[in-house]
Image (cartoon, rainbow, N blue to C red):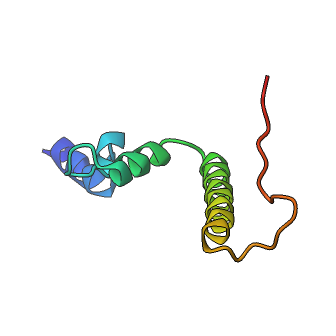
């Protein structure tokens, strides 16, 4: 009887184990790009996520610059002279 009391007292102080799968967030929508990205980002180190976010930001800034120059060409607002965007052949 004394052993039962010791086990129940020790069991109440013990911290419950959390399984890694239980802590992960899962998107309920199949093939959700945001859910897939967040699920993948949970498993990597924070510096890797920071690097990927910075690279994505640079990509979108470059794409915006290309679209702005193209819009200026279409509207005719760009002054005549050398083009801001030039083709570079990569061999």
Residue sitting farthest toward the right: 81
Q: How many marks?
A: 0
Q: Can you see residue 4? A: yes
**Quarter placement of the N terminus:** top left
Q: Nearer the viewer, residue 64 or 54?
A: 64
Residue at the image point whose x is 20% and y is 51% from the top: 29
Residue 63 locus on image (x, y percent)? 62, 57
- The residue lying at 37 percent from left, 54 percent from top is 34
Q: Is 3 on the left-hand or right-hand side of 42?
A: left
- Position of the C terminus by quadrant: top right
- Indicate the quadrant where residue 82 lies: bottom right
Q: Does residue 72 appear to the left or right of 43 in the view shown?
A: right
| Figure quadrant of residue 62 | bottom right
Left or right: 61, with 91 as reference point: left
Indicate the position of residue 37 as horizontal and vertical percent values. Answer: 42, 48
Q: Is residue 16 visible?
A: no
Q: With respect to residue 60, does 71 lie above or below?
A: below
In front: 69, or 35? 69
Q: Residue at x 54, y 42 (%)?
A: 44
* Foreground pick, 23 / 89: 89
Direction top: furthest residue: 91
Give how far across and how far down residue 12 sits, in percent: 26, 56
């Amino acid at each position: 009887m004394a052993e039962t009391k010791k086990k129940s007292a020790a069991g109440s102080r013990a911290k419950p184990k959390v399984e890694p799968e239980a802590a992960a967030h899962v998107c309920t929508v199949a093939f959700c790009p945001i859910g897939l990205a967040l699920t993948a980002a949970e498993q990597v180190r924070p510096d890797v996520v920071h690097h990927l976010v910075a690279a994505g930001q640079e990509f979108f800034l470059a794409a915006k610059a290309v679209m702005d120059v193209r819009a200026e060409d279409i509207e005719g607002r760009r002054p005549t002279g050398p083009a801001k965007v030039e083709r570079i052949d990569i061999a």
